Image (spheres, rainbow, N blue to C red):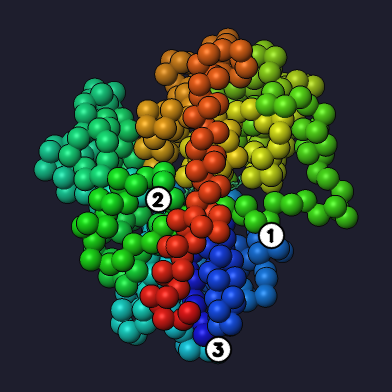
């Protein structure tokens, strides 16, 4: 029996895509009659958050103690969380590695943490580096030295945000404002703890993207890196979205069923980041004034926001996001531009109202708005986040008669086809994952 040990970074935006990758690899290996156990290492806290559907045949979970600050406070102490994830998990992981039953054929680890690579290298276990963000983000992070030598690292965005950067291999021209926020002024505090594939000694690299979406960035990386690079696809749960007819539908799905096609704006800022209470209130008033139907995932704050929004929209704490995005009534996604949300929106053919908050989201915003033309940046329309301007922008964005929206819908529908084809039988993802399975000598 082969065993692959999988080490996700303990966050929803990282664990979800990695589990989806495990499903893809496991079904591929099973087709070749090579039973392989995927042993996923999570903290005890995370085991409690996982959807029971994640626990499938050849995928099992093992836990290490809760050595990190709680996931529930991750957004308010990103530095503390990142530092703990870099320093406190290695020891319990090594102890666990000594205990597990079958020999470990391969480790797949999120590059956000360094220590799995040190452990694998010390023990001569082959290791694949998993990058949960875009290939473009990989390129920027990999070429941070170029930013430094061009004196554009840690620059003040207010003063120099519009300066262009056109020397990063594989990337079209971008600005300082488009850089990930850890490279804006103040980002120095993330030095050494922010995700970086630089200097990591891995045998393989898996990037959670599709070739058709970022071909130049991927070609650029392939021409530079010594290790083979595979695209692992959107890594979203597209194969598990059929609702179980024997279960009651969630209230929000029934609510969406009652709305006409493409009229609802879905609003979510991801799994752990948030904006200030004052901004949340302006957004609530703005959405309500817009007269547009909306479904809003607002973690933890729902009762106050429900009061403001009344019957104009639905406010929930959590939803099955991909299922929502694929619902026929959804016509737009106001998103913080987390990479999973971006891929889910493109896959579902939903245009985005981009609202980057931090990390790679600024760069994702640039791809959405400038490169793919599949959305608007709300901050370009609304200089200060005030209700009247929000209401107008939301109305304009969702106006099915506007030529700008019609063109944007055509673009996003084209991207949806591209994404869906990439995961089909003859798609590029199958090719890459087959090659990966072959190369790790398990097929
Ligand atoms: O109500 C909800 C809200 C979220 N999700 C899912 O949670 C995931 C959220 O991922 P993402 O959109 O990437 O946001 P974050 O959780 O904020 O992701 C972090 O990790 C990503 C991948 O590294 C980065 O791109 C982001 O910037 C970073 O904030 C997605 O799959 C969503 O479908 C739900 O299923 N239901």
Outermost residue, left side: 149
Relative side of 307 to 423, left or right: right
Whole-angstrom CA distance, mark 3 to mark 1, is: 26 Å
Discs 2/1, front:
2
Q: Position of residue 153 (x, y in %)?
A: 21, 39
Mark 3 or mark 2: whose residue is earlier in sequence: 3
Where on the picture, by quarter, is residue 129?
Answer: bottom left
Give the CA distance from mark 2 to mark 1.
Answer: 29 Å
User: Pointer 2: what residue?
Assistant: 211
Q: Which residue is mark 3?
A: 1
Residue at mark 1:
51
Please state the horizontal and vertical placement of residue 197, each as a whole percent of the image.
30, 59
Residue beneath the point at 27% across and 70% down: 201
Label 1: which secondary element: loop
In three-dimensional space, the C-alpha distance between marks 3 and 2, rounded to whole angstroms, equals 32 Å
Residue shown at 46%/15% (left/top)?
381
Quadrant position of the N terminus in the picture: bottom right
Q: Earlier in the sequence, mark 3 or mark 1?
A: 3
Is residue 285 at all visible to an observer of this figure? no
């Amino acid at each position: 029996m082969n065993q692959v040990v999988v080490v996700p970074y303990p966050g929803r935006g990282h664990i979800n895509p990695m589990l989806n990758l495990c499903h893809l690899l496991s079904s591929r290996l099973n087709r070749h009659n090579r039973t392989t156990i995927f042993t996923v290492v999570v903290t005890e806290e995370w085991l409690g958050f996982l959807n029971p559907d994640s626990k499938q045949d050849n995928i099992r979970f093992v836990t290490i103690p809760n050595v990190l600050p709680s996931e529930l406070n991750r957004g308010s102490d990103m530095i503390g969380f990142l530092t703990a994830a870099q320093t406190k998990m290695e020891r319990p992981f090594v102890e666990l590695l000594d205990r597990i039953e079958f020999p470990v054929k391969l480790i797949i680890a999120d590059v956000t943490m360094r220590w799995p690579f040190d452990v694998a290298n010390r023990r001569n276990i082959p290791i694949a580096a998993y990058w949960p963000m875009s290939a473009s983000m990989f390129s920027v992070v990999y070429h941070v030295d170029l930013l430094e030598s061009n004196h554009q690292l840690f620059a003040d965005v207010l003063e120099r945000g519009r300066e262009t950067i056109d020397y990063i291999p594989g990337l079209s021209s971008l600005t300082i404002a488009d850089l990930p926020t850890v490279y804006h002024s103040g980002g120095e505090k993330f030095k050494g703890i922010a995700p970086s594939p630089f200097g990591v000694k891995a045998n393989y690299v898996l990037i959670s993207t599709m070739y058709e979406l970022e071909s130049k960035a991927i070609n650029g990386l392939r021409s530079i890196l010594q290790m083979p690079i595979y695209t692992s696809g959107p890594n979203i749960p597209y194969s598990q979205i059929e609702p179980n007819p024997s279960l009651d539908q969630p209230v929000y799905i029934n609510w969406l069923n009652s709305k006409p096609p493409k009229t609802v704006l879905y609003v979510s800022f991801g799994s752990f980041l948030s904006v200030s209470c004052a901004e949340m209130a302006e957004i609530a008033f703005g959405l309500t004034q817009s007269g547009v139907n909306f479904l809003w995932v607002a973690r933890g704050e729902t009762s106050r926001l429900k009061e403001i929004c009344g019957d104009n929209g639905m406010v929930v704490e959590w939803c099955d996001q991909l299922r929502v995005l694929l619902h026929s009534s959804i016509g737009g996604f106001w998103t913080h531009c987390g990479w999973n949300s971006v891929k889910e929106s493109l896959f579902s053919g939903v245009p985005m109202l981009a609202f980057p908050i931090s990390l790679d989201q600024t760069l994702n915003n640039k791809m959405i708005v400038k490169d793919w033309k599949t959305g608007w940046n709300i901050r370009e329309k609304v200089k200060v986040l005030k209700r009247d301007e929000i209401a107008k922008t939301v109305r304009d964005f969702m106006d099915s008669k506007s030529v700008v929206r019609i063109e944007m819908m055509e673009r996003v529908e084209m991207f949806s086809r591209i994404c869906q084809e990439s995961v089909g039988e003859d798609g590029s993802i199958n090719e890459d994952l087959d090659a990966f399975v072959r190369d790790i000598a398990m097929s």
